[in-house]
Amino acid sequence: MKEIMIRRVVDKEGRVTIPKSMRTQLGIQELDEVAMVYEQESIVMRKYDSPFDGKEEKTCFITGSISNDHWHFSGDIVLSKEGAIWLLDEIQSYWIKVGI
């Protein structure tokens, strides 16, 4: 995959405009949802697939991995097994830091 770099300014509300050429390549249209994943000091953005569609693949909120075997939680949270383990480790680490 060819890496394309386009610079954009973040506005005071934290918004960034996705260039039309990139939206076209990804099939992102007005009112579509996108998923953002923090990954190794970067933000990875993908077109979001609804977790409510029967056998459709879902994107893990933590790892960004895509599968139809991920777990769906309330609040539209989708986690892979690896993502759930990572999140649990993070929560337990936080509890240790604050003395819970």
Image (cartoon, rainbow, N blue to C red):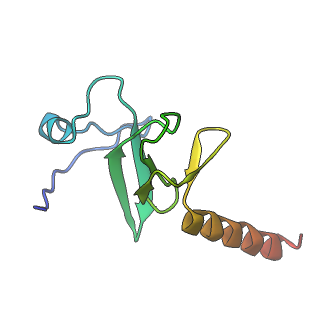
Count of number-bearing discs: 0
Q: Residue at x 12, y 56 (%)?
A: 4
Residue at the top extreme of this rendering: 30
Image quadrant occupied by the C terminus: bottom right
| Left/right of residue 22 with respect to residue 36 in the rendered view | left
> Residue, x 42% and y 60% (percent of image)?
65
**The N terminus is located in which quarter?**
bottom left
Residue at the farthest right position: 100
40 or 49: nearer the eye?
A: 49
- x 26%, y 27%: residue: 29
Work out whether residue 14 or residue 72 is closer to the camera in this orientation and state it. Answer: 72
Front in this rendered view, residue 81 or 25: 81
Give x and y (percent) for residue 51: 51, 39
Q: Which residue is depicted at the point 58% across and 65% down?
A: 81
Within the image, what quadrant is residue 16 found in?
top left
Q: In the picture shown, does residue 71 fall above or below 88? A: above
Residue 67, percent across and down?
A: 44, 55
Task: Return the x and y of residue 45 as percentages of the image width and height.
Answer: 34, 50
Left or right of 98? Residue 30 is left
Residue 61, x across and y down, in percent? 51, 53
In this image, 76 relative to 23: left or right?
A: right
